[in-house]
Structures are given as C-alpha cells and as structure tokens.
Image (tube, grey):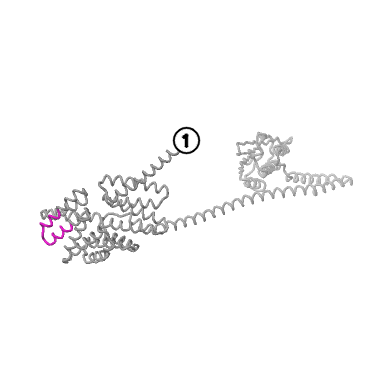
Amino acid sequence: MKPTVYILFICLFGVALHIRAQHKVDSLTYYYQVVGHPESNSQLAKAYNFFKQHKNQSLQKKDIEKAVFDLRLLASIEKKMGLLSDSEISSVEALELLGQMEDSEKIKENRIGIYNHLGIVYRSLDNPSKALEFYNKSLELVEDESSRATLLNNIGNLYLDKNEYTKALMYFEEAYDKSPYLSLKMKARVLDNLGVAQSKLNLPEALPNLLEALSIKENSNYVPGIITSYSHLSDYYLDIGDKEVARDYGYKALDLAKILNNPQYLESALSTLMLLNGTPEVVQYKKLKDSLEKARRNAKDNFEYYRYQFSEQQRLFEESEFKRQKLFMLLVLVVLVFIAVYFVGRIKHNKEKLQKVFETETRISKKVHDEVANDVYQIMTKLQSSKETEEVLDHLEAVYRKTRDISKENSEIDVGSNFGETLMELLKGFHTEDVRVLVQNISKVEWKLFSNLQKATIYRVLQELMVNMRKHSKATYVVLKFKQNGKRFQIQYTDNGVGTELCKKNGLQNTENRIKSIKGSITFETDNGAGFKALIRI
C-alpha cells in the first residue's frame, strides 16, 4: 500500500470513529431531552430502550456513576408511563450502586434526587408514610433554597391528600416564602397548591392565589400546569356550590388534556366531570372505585423498598456469616491437617519401627555369628583334640547349628536389584530330600516397583512361614504362587502338612504385624490334618 493511500485510510478511519462517537453523544443528548419533554409514548419507549442498553454498557465498563445516571432516567420514564413499581425498582437499584461509591458532592446530589423521586412514587402508590420518609431524607441533605422549596411543596401535597389542610398550608407557606429563589413555573406551582389549601380552609385569599397561579402558567405557556389549575379551580367552585363555573373549568381541563393526549390528565378531567354531571349512583360508583383502587395499591408488597431498607443489615449479616464460614473452614482445615499429620506421622513411625526391627535382627544375627557360633566352634575343636566323649560333641554341634540358623534367619537382606534371586535362594534353602518346595512365577514379579521396606518385609514373612513349616507341619511339599497386576501383588502359600488349630501367636502373629505395617494383609486357612494355607496381599 502506498504511503499516501495508507495515510488517507487512517484519516478516514479516524473520521468514522469520530462520527460514531459523535452519534452516540448526540443520541444521549436527544433521548435525555425526550425524557424531560416527551411528545408521545413511543418516544418515551425508545428513550427507555436506549437508556436500558446504556445502563448495561455502563455496568459492563464498571462506570457506576453513568449507570446511576441511566437508572434515574429510567425511573423517570417508568413514572411517566405509569409503571410505578418498576420506577421504584430502578430508583432502589440506583441507591444500591451509590452505596458502592465513596461519598462526594455528586453522590449527595444523586441521593437527594432519588429520595425525592421515591417520595413522588410512593405518593402515587398511596403510601404517604413512605413518601414522607423519603422526602424528609432528601430534606436533611439539601441546602439550596430552590430545592428545599420543591421538597416542602411535595410534603404539603402529601398532607393535602390526607385532608390535613392546616399542615399542608404550613408547608406551602414556607415553600412560597422562598419565591425569590424559584423559577416562574415552580412559583406558580407552589402558589396554586397554596390556594388549594386555603380554599379547603375557607380562607379569602384562596381564589386570588389560584387565579394568579393560572395567569403565570398561561404567560409561560405551561400547558400541564394550566390543566392542573383548571382542575383546582373546578374543585374550588364545586366546593362553594357553583357547578356551572366548575363544569366550565372542567371542560377546559379536558380540552387541553385531549391536546396533550396524556392519559393521566384525561382520566383526572373526566373523573371531575363525572362527579359534576353524573347521577348519585355514578358519583357513588366513582367513589367506591377510587376507594377500591386505593386499597389495592396500599396492599401491594413494596418488596424493593424493604430490600433497600434492610440491605445494610443484610450486608452486615452476610459479612458476619462469611467470616463465620471462613473461621469454620479454617478450623476444618486445621483439623484435617492435624489428622493428616497424625496419620502420616503414625505411618512414618511404623515404618521407622519396622526398620529398627530389621536393624535389630541384623545386629543380633551378626553378634550371634561373630561371638556365640565362633565360641562354640572353638570349644568343639578343643574337645576333639582332648578326645572327649562323642555325646558332648554331638550336643555342641546341635547348638552350633541352632546359632547358625538364628544368624541366617536374622541376617542382613539384599533388597537391591538382585532381590528376586535372594528370595529364591531363601526358598530353595528349605528344599530337602524330605520336603519339595515349588515356586511359581517369581521371575515375572517387577521388584523395582516395591520399596526396600516392602521387599524386606516380604522376605521375613516368607522366611517365618517356611521356618514354621519346617518345625511344625511335617509337610512333604510346599507351593508358593506369585501373582502381580500392576501395583497389586499377592503370594499364595500352600503345604500338605498336618495343619493346626488356627491360633495367631508367636510366628503367625509376627507375620501379620509385619504385613500390616506395609499396608498389606495376610489370611490363614488351616485345620488339623488338612494342611496349611496363607494368602498375602499388598
């Protein structure tokens, strides 16, 4: 690719990225404006989908601040679309995300806004106690006069809903005292609510305040506010018994609600006109319907609110539970390590003990050979030269043979690469004119797979079996079958001797202890006159 073409490609690519980023920024600005001033429900739906996707992207990027921004807009859209429970859920989720961030002025502003929004939502859900709780939370944090006036106005509306007009008047008056800090729309809204409270208390300044509020709204072309003023004036004239003027303001509110095509305003205007134009039955039905609707909303389980309210306690409980589980797991680990160390130490101790037995046997064998056998041999030599009796010589020769046998039985074992031959020599040593010893498959055993301790143990166990055969069994033949399958190994011993009552003591008990020490097993099968069998498994 030529340099100029390459540079052109990079420039075009950069422009494309810039356009894409600009489009994303423009979309964010556009849909933000839609939330503030929607022209239709379809616009709100598109804005909802945009901010839903934007929130998920923010969470993936771990940008908590942007995710909170998105959730607040989602909550606002859901409130406008009448999805009050969804709006509550979005607001609570935003609060939970704020809990993950360090306190700052920005976090404080977000909390104030979310608390206020939740107050509005709970008022719409006919739950004034929760609404008041969140309004007061917001009021504790707010400092600027305009925001305080908004919250005071909202609290005043709560008391209007509860027909506590004196309390409502107190909050509206305090809010209106902050008029120099308020926008015209906000001033008109507070003044309008003040007039409503005054009208319910039959105060003379009620109508002038209601009309002044309407005038400010009309001059500002604040259509939603104008509809509200028409409704309030309709209620005012209905309360004083002038149904004609009340009906006139009611129809004005309906006409503007049709222009806005807002279901909430339409329902409110039609409801007022039903009360003005309907029969007593219609009025009774309307009141009953409103009562049932309010009861239904009050009965709803506001699960998300309670989840937020107790989230901190739950978090602390989970942390405590996690610490407890960690402590428990640590304790279990310590116990397991202790058990493992104990058994490893025990196995090691048994191996060391067995090794010491072999060392002791070897030492005894050497001492018997070097000292006792030699001394006996020297005595025999002296006696022969002194021409002593044959009986003494025969006795000494028997003693000599015994010491030689003891030495041989406990001598050091060659457990090296020639172990198979060493073991075969041991077994052949018991082959005599009277006893035939048959050994099968010993050459097929891979002795390199066995430890020195295992080989020495096998040697001693077979030696003890053969010695036991020679001393007690009166057998004429012995068969030893070796069988190996990987690390599994067994030796089957069989003789045709006189057998015995199976009683594990002396030699038999010794063989069993030796085999157990290397995690093996030995079983015996015998009876008087029926021969003797042993099966060794390792």
The extreme right residue here reads: 386
Q: Which residue is mark 1?
A: 4
Q: Which of the 4 image quadrants contains residue 43?
A: top left
Left or right: 377, with 233 as reference point: right
Crowding at label 1, few (<14), some or many (≥20) Cα neighbours within 10 Å? few
The residue under the point 85% across, 47% down is: 378
Where disc 1 sits, the SS reads helix
Q: How many marks?
A: 1
Q: Position of residue 391 (x, y in %)?
A: 83, 45
- The quadrant of the image that shows the C terminus is top right
Q: Is residue 11 visible?
A: yes
Residue 33 placement (x, y as % from top left): 30, 49
Query: Left or right of 184: which side holds 465?
Result: right
x 22%, y 53%: residue: 221
The residue drawn where x is 40% and y is 59% is 104
The residue positioned 62% from the left and 36% from the top of the image is 484
Instruction: Give the amino acid at mark 1.
Output: Thr
Residue 249 at x, y = what percent?
14, 55
Q: Which residues are magenta?
A: 231-250
